[in-house]
Amino acid sequence: MAQHEPFPDPASAPPLRGYAFLTATFAGLAVVGGALAGRAGPSVELQARDVALLGAATFKISRLVTREHVTTVMRRPFTRHAGPDGDPTEVPRRDGPVRQALGELLLCPYCLDHWVAAGFVIGLHRAPDTTRAVAAVYAVTAVGDAAQLAWRAAQARA
């Protein structure tokens, strides 16, 4: 039987207890959210337009939370500044496995996507009109961001 080598630096070890906490929390919220969605009345059929709307909104919210300067205040309890002056680089705090895992979650848009998407899908079943309205705000903002990037690229080529 192969032996696993320990991490040479304990500080570089993944926060497995923190990951377990986040996984259990996500699973618990998904079960409760699913049960509440099921009690909301007639089921809302997830249509292609909902997938597109919620997908664009999930993208925008995940990027907003994990990357924008204005949301640093939300991340700061779980992250710390690590770059030179003027560099916005953040890294997870390493003073506890849950704090580190939350820091990693709040710095990874791909990781946060699952949480945001689950919230939107559950919301679609609990309050479809409100969920679509909130999602539309973020989806339209994502389209606006894409237009801004296209404009900037066109200006750079001119």
Image: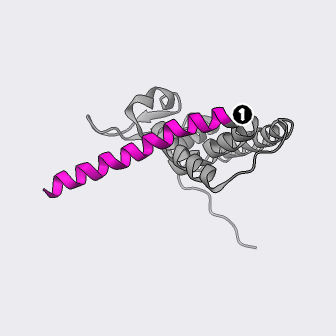
Q: Which residue occupies the foreground of this view, 50 or 19?
A: 50
Q: Tell me if residue 55 comes above or below residue 85 in the rendering.
A: below
As helix, strand or loop, the secondary structure at mark 1 comes to: loop
**Residue beneath the point at 70% across and 40% down:** 124
Q: Which residue occupies the foreground of this view, 156 or 9?
A: 156
Could you tell me if residue 76 is visible in this image? yes
Q: Tell me if residue 73 comes above or below residue 157 in the rendering.
A: above
Q: Position of residue 153 (x, y in %)?
A: 24, 54
Q: Is residue 131 magenta?
A: yes
- In magenta, the rendered stretch is 129-158
Q: Which residue occupies the foreground of this view, 114 or 17?
A: 114
Residue located farthest toward the left when viewing the structure as drawn: 158
Side of 125 relative to 54 (left or right):
right
**Residue beneath the point at 38% across and 33% down:** 69
Q: Position of residue 157 (x, y in %)?
A: 16, 58
Residue type beneath disc 1: Ala
Q: Please count the marks in the image.
A: 1
Side of 58 relative to 85 (left or right):
right
Q: Position of residue 5 (x, y in %)?
A: 62, 63
Side of 128 relative to 81 (left or right):
right
Answer with the quarter of the image where residue 83 lies. Answer: top left
**Residue beneath the point at 38% across and 43% down:** 144
Q: Which residue is mark 1?
A: 127
Q: Position of residue 54 (x, y in %)?
A: 59, 46
- What coloring was used for the rendering? one colour
